[in-house]
Amino acid sequence: MSNRSIIGLLLIVLGAVFILNNYFDIFDSFGSWWPLLLILIGLVQLLKRASSVFGGLLLIAVGLLFLGKNLNFIPGRLIFPLILICIGLFFIFSRIGGTRQENADYIRYFTLFSGLETNNQSQNFKGGSVAAVFGGSEIDLREARLSDQGAVLELTAMFGGVDLIVPKHWKVEVSGMPIFGGWENKAVYEGGSADDHVQVLKVNCTAVFGGITIRN
């Protein structure tokens, strides 16, 4: 599902909610149903091909826990221990995924309540995904080389930030879906002659109460 389709779907749902509120005052019970927003964002992450599966599943799990508490299915005293268990499981599985491999042609980094700084020197970089949840990631690609087909990189910042550093001879094309967050492309493209092969990095950004910066 493309970013345009996702944004369009979210706008349609939001419009429908406002219409229903005129008749049923559903906002009066928003305090109980707000975790559905986390679940929806998590589902969107899972639908996006290159996004972090761990980030999407974590949001869905947390959303379900809070929803169960608000609907009196889960005792409030169990929420904090269950969230700790979920975070522990995601730490374990993120390590199994090998998220800290440098020089990898395809990366998959996931940080949770932590930070990551990496310098990737791949000579055939194809893209991947970077997700920062309540943390930050700095991905330095200045010594890397794009594959001949270019690369697609999925960046996700949830209550955190992602800083992507690219060389000036890369052309960066950015699309984004900000949800109470934002992204900024500061990368300067210094291309060669018209006969040169243009290296293109396509970056898809999802910022949920977070920020993404792309620079040289």
Image (cartoon, grey):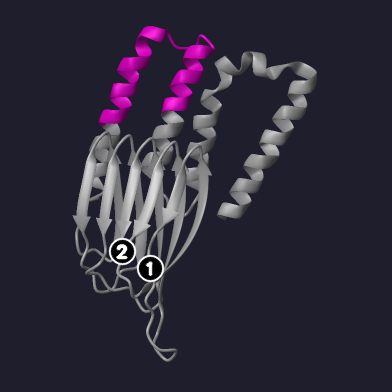
78 up-or-down from 18: above or below: above
Q: Circle 1 is placed at which residue position?
A: 188
Q: Which residues are magenta?
A: 62-88
Left or right? Give the position of 14 relative to 65.
right
Residue pictured at 31% horizontal, 65% vertical: 166
Q: Secondary structure at mark 2?
A: loop
Task: Confirm whether residue 122 shows in the render.
Answer: yes
Question: Which one is earlier in the sequence, the residue at label 1 or at label 2?
Answer: 1
Circles 1 and 2: CB distance less than 8 Å? yes
Q: Residues within 10 Å of mark 1 (few under 14, many from 20)?
A: some
Q: Work out whether 203 lies above or below 17.
A: below
The answer to whether residue 52 is seen in the rendering is: no
Residue occupied by mark 2:
216
Q: Please, what is the three-letter code of the amino acid marked with disc 2?
A: Asn
Using the numbered discs, state the Cα–Cα distance from disc 1 to disc 2 in whole angstroms: 7 Å
Does residue 66 sit above or below 14 in this rendering?
above
Q: Quadrant of residue 216?
A: bottom left
Q: Position of residue 17 (x, y in %)?
A: 70, 29
Residue at 57 percent of width and 20 percent of height: 33
Q: Is residue 100 left or right of residue 4?
A: left
